[in-house]
Amino acid sequence: TSVSEVKFTRHALEKFDSLKRYGFHIDESQVVDVVINPEHVERRDNQFFAVKLIDSKHALRVVYEKRKGFLVVITFYPVRRERYDL
């Protein structure tokens, strides 16, 4: 999967600004990195939940779907790393 094959929903794009208000400065490249190089992935029906560390206390969880020829990021959010044994 390459970067050109990852798209974002409007909701996902709005998450960047809302997370900044809480002190989490996440950019598109970090989200794409979690999708392409996750430390852990779960699947529920057609949605994938990828997780990767972003700092010493937090991981980034990204919810995405596989569509024809590309991936769509539905949403993403920081989580405490110990919740995922990272």
Image (cartoon, rainbow, N blue to C red):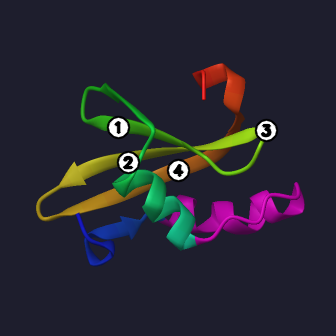
Q: Nearer the viewer, residue 26 or 19?
A: 26
Residue 48 is marked as: 1
Give the Cα separation between the discs numbered 1 and 2.
5 Å
Give the Cα separation between the discs numbered 2 and 3.
23 Å
**Magenta segment range?**
10-27
Give the Cα separation between the discs numbered 4 and 3.
20 Å
Residue 57 is marked as: 3
Q: Position of residue 71 (x, y in %)?
A: 28, 59
Mark 3 burial class by Cα count in 10 Å: few <14, some 14-19, many 20+: few
Quarter of the view holding residue 67: bottom left
Element under disc 3: loop
Q: In the image, what residue type sits under mark 4?
A: Thr
Q: Earlier in the sequence, mark 2 or mark 3?
A: 3
Q: Is residue 26 left or right of residue 36?
A: right
Residue 75 is marked as: 4
Residue position marked by numbered label 2 in the rendering: 64
Q: In the image, what residue type sits under mark 2?
A: Tyr
Asked whether disc 4 touches disc 2, contact meaning CB atoms under 8 Å apart, the reply is: no
Residue 25 counted in the magenta span = yes
Asked whether disc 1 touches disc 2, contact meaning CB atoms under 8 Å apart, the reply is: yes
